[in-house]
Image: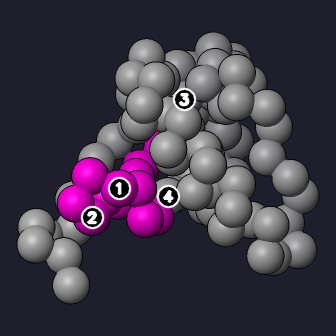
Amino acid sequence: MSAEPTRIRRVEPSDEASLNAWFEVLNRALEFGEEDPLPPLEEMRGLLAGEEPGLHALGLVSEEDGTAVGALLVECDESGSDTIE
């Protein structure tokens, strides 16, 4: 059992450690489903940084005792279409 409560926080594209941990957990989770593989890390960084015109994305990572144990990606485009992984 964790000594600290689970912490959920936003992934900042400039925070290398957080971004890498989030990407690794998200990638591992999608390996077990029938989802398409994730784009490369640098492409995901650009997505979270808002570099895709007309597309907004939010990455969240959950941590227990400083270790990433969960990841969430929310994407929404200007048409109102959204994706949650």
- Choose mark 1 or mark 4, whichever is in front: 1
Marks 2,4: beta carbons within 8 A: no
Secondary element under disc 1, as helix, strand or loop, is strand
Tell me the distance, in whole angstroms, between the alpha carbons under discs 3 and 4.
Answer: 13 Å
Placement of the N terminus among the 4 image quadrants = bottom left
Real-space Cα separation, disc 2 to disc 4, in angstroms: 12 Å
Circle number at residue 79: none
Q: What residue is shown with label 2?
A: 64
* First to last magenta residue range: 59-70
Residue to which mark 4 is pinned: 71
Which residue shows up at 70% across the image and 21% down it? 42
The overriding secondary structure of the stretch rendered in magenta is strand
Residue at 64% over, 19% down: 46
Query: Are the residues flagged by discs 3 and 4 in contact, CB closer than 8 Å?
Result: no
Please name the amino acid that badge 2 sits on.
Answer: Glu
Q: Earlier in the sequence, mark 3 or mark 4?
A: 3
Say which mark, if any, is on residue 48: 3
Q: Is residue 22 visible?
A: yes
Q: Is residue 63 magenta?
A: yes
Residue 69 position (above or below residue 67): below
* Distance in Å between CA atoms under marks 2 and 1: 5 Å
